[in-house]
Image (spheres, grey):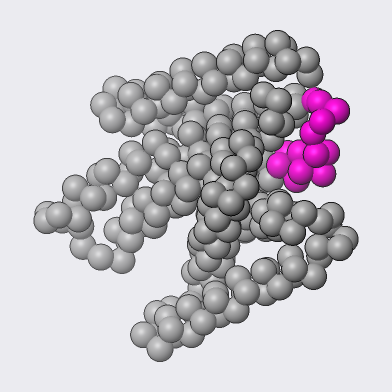
Amino acid sequence: MKFMNRRIVIYIFIIAELMLYTGFMYIDITGMASYVFSGWLKFTGIILCFLYALLIRNQKEDKTDIFILRIALLFTVISDLFILMLDIYLIGLFTFCIVQALYLVRIRRWRNQSDLVTGSGIIIKAFGRNIAVTLGILVVLLVFKVKIEALVVVSCFYFISILFNVIDAVSIAFKSKIKRRILFAAGMVLFLLCDINVGIFNVSGFIDINGGWFTTVYQFAAIAMWMFYLPAQTIIAISGLSESM
């Protein structure tokens, strides 16, 4: 993709995402239209992120890195199809775990400046760390007699995965000062903020939210999930660009 063409595509992409973002945020805040319409605007924004990543073409690009990003964004589309559009949370969370596994690979390639073969041992160790921490959390939950269901297990593993990915991505961004890594780290931080609000929103199923400060927090979380999420995915998609942007 030539330099000027790249500029045009990125501007069109950002303007389109801003239009969708403004639309569903207005609906979510005011309730002036149906939740279904808001959902379609959100899902369209996620699809655009994937389509944008497919347009990245440049001889200077790290083709393996771009491939990983595209597959991760494809699984992000699949995840939102199940969670946002179909209300099937277990499968959606499982595919989000695949997204974070792919981002773990992307981050570890950056950290160790290695390909998938020579860096596989380090990637496996990081993946094992995530599993070990998840098991530790599940043991604690069992001690407190929390019912361990499949959704709880997958949710714990997913949150641990994104948490470590954010820590690693931010660390690499500060050390390298490379544009695409800084963009990716920023996107991952917003991604985590979205998931924190998702957690707060879902806590309502376990505690009473009638009255008190939590009602305000709950109402904010209901809007903040996508307030952070679409910008996160947009920035992550843009992080596929080379330093020549």
The residue under the point 85% across, 28% down is: 59
Identify the magenta region. Answer: 57-70
Residue 133 position (above or below residue 22): below
Give the residue furthest to the bottom: 143
Q: Relative to the observer, which residue lies in front, 28 or 123?
A: 123
Q: Position of residue 127 (x, y in %)?
A: 68, 68
The answer to whether one can see residue 71 in this image is no
Q: Point out the image quarter for the C terminus.
A: top right
Residue 62, by quadrant, is top right
Side (left or right) of 134 relative to 103: left
The stretch drawn in magenta includes residue 21: no
The residue under the point 74% across, 59% down is: 112
Side (left or right) of 11 relative to 214: right
Q: Position of residue 237 (x, y in %)?
A: 63, 34
Q: Position of residue 20 (x, y in %)?
A: 47, 22
The residue under the point 40% across, 54% down is: 196
Q: Relative to the observer, which residue lies in front, 64 or 159?
A: 64
Side (left or right) of 128 relative to 215: right
Residue 113 position (above or below residue 142): above
The stretch drawn in magenta includes residue 66: yes
Q: Point out the image quarter for the N terminus.
A: top right
